[in-house]
Image: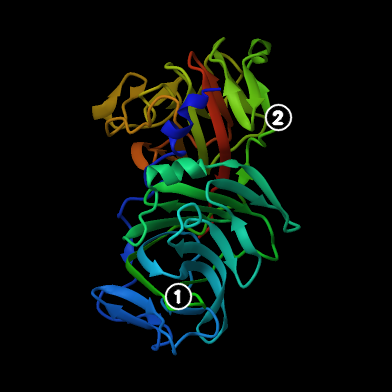
Amino acid sequence: MLGWILVASLMACSRAPAQGTEEGFVSLFNGQDLTGWDGDPRFWSVVDGAIRGQTREGALPTHNTFCIWRGGTVRNFILKVKFRIQNGNSGIQYRCREIGKWRVAGYQAEVENSPGKVGFLYDEAARGWLVNVGDFVLIDREGQKHGLGKVADREALIKAGYYKPQDWNEYTIVCRGNHILHYLNGFPTVELIDEDPKGRALEGLIALQIHTGPPMTVEFKDIRLKRLPDTFGEAKLLFNGRDLEGWTFSSDALRGTWSVRDGVLFNLGSPAGYIRTVEDYTNYVLRMQLRHLTPGNGGVLLRIVGPDKVWPRSIEAQGQRGNLGDIWNIDQFPMKTDPDRTSGRHTRKMHPSNERPLGEWNEYEIVLDGGNLELWVNGLLQNTATDCWETPGKIGLQSEGAQMEFRNLVLIPILRGKP
C-alpha cells in the first residue's frame, strides 16, 4: 500500500518533539568552564564554548570515562544537547548510576559519525543494545525485547540527512515514567517502553562519554534541561499491532471499516462512526502517529461519555487533513477555549498547519491533565483548552471520510494528586 511514498515520507515526523520549546528549560553548562561537571581533567576541558572530550596517543583511557553533571539526578525530563564528534565513539548518558571513579552505567543516546547508528539507545555497562534507529521496542518484565513497529524508516532517515557527520547536531531526549524517546535534529529515531523492573532506571545522573579505543575528539554545548512532573504512571500500549484487543466499535456497521495491516491500524473512512477503547481513561499523555492515505476527515475523541452514537459527547482532537490541532466540542462537552479562535463548537489551531505531505506520518500528542488540554502536532503546540470536564471516558478514533492509518498508540497515565 502506497509503496511509492517510502522515501517521500522519510520518517514519522521531522519536527522537534512535544513540549520541545525553550520555555521551562535551564542551562546545565555555562559555556566557560566545567563548573557543575566532574570528569578526568586529562580528557575533559572547555574549548571555544564547548565541553571537549579528547584523547591522544600515549594518554588513552583504559575504560570508558565520563564527565558527570553534579547538579542532581533527573527523573522525568526533556534534555537537549548539541554535539559534534570528529572521530571515535561517544554518548549522552541519562538516568545513569555511578559504578566507579568517573564511570557510570545506564541509558545512553549514541554519538558517532555513523548515519543509521547514531541515534540508537544503549544501556551502558548493563543490558547493552536496546533499540535500533527507527524502531519502537517494548522490554517486558522478564527483560525480553519485543519489536512493536517503526517510528521512522532508517534508510529514509539517512537519505533525508537526519545526521550531519562531523558537524553540530542536536539530540532531544524525552523521558516520562518508563517511556523514552530520542530525536536527532528533530527526526524521531527510537521509542521505548521499558517494563523491566531489574534493568530499567526511572531516575539518575546525566553524563557525557569518552569511549576507549583510538584517539578521539567529541564536543558538547547548549545543554538544556526541562524537568517534568513526577506524576507519570506506567506507559500502556493501546494498540498491540496484531488485532483489535481492547477496542470496540461504535456500531456493527463499523466492523468492516477497521482492520490491522502490517502492524498498522487501518480505517476505510466510511461509514461514519468510530472505534473506541473498552476502558475509561481520565488524565494522560496520548501519543500516536497517523497519516492520511486520502484527503478527508477523521479525528481522535477524548473523554467519551454516554451511549455510542454519531457523535458522542466528547472532545474531538481534529484529524481532518490540513486541520490537525483544531478542537471540536461535541454535544456541549464542558470546556473553555480561546474565544478569539472559537466559532461555535470549533476552535482553530494557533499556528498554520505543520502537517507532513499527504501519505507521510504525523506525530499527534494529546495531553489531558485535569481540566487542561494541549494538542501537539509534530512537536508544535497547536491548541489548548482549560476547565475541561475531568471525567473518566473512552478514547475513540473516528471514521469520517478519509482513509487513514494509525500506529504507536501509547498512553502515559498522569497520576493526579501526586506531588
Q: Residues within 10 Å of mark 2 (few under 14, many from 20)?
A: some
Spatial CA span between label 1 and label 2: 43 Å
Viewer-nearest of labels 1 and 2?
Answer: 2
Amino acid at circle 2? Asp
Corner quadrant of residue 228: bottom left
Q: Secondary structure at mark 1?
A: loop
Quarter of the image containing the N terminus?
top right
The structure residue drawn at horizontal position 52% and vertical position 37%, both measured from the top left corner, is: 288
The image position of residue 303, as x and y in percent, is 54, 31
The image position of residue 89, as x and y in percent, is 47, 69
From the viewer's perspective, is residue 311 above or below residue 41? Answer: above
The structure residue drawn at horizontal position 39% and vertical position 28%, both measured from the top left corner, is: 324
- Indicate which disc residue 243 carries: 2
The image position of residue 18, as x and y in percent, is 41, 46
Q: Is residue 368 visible?
A: no
Circle nearer the N terminus (1, 2)? 1
Corner quadrant of residue 144: bottom right
Between 113 and 131, which is closer to the camera in this rendering? 113
Corner quadrant of residue 340: top left
Amino acid at circle 1? Gly
- Indicate which disc residue 72 carries: 1
Between 306 and 212, which is closer to the camera in this rendering? 212
Q: Residues within 10 Å of mark 1 (few under 14, many from 20)?
A: few
Q: Is residue 90 visible?
A: yes
Q: Secondary structure at mark 2?
A: loop
The image position of residue 231, as x and y in percent, is 53, 55
Q: Is residue 66 left or right of residue 353?
A: right
Q: Is residue 253 left or right of residue 62?
A: right
From the viewer's perspective, is residue 152 above or below residue 272? Answer: below
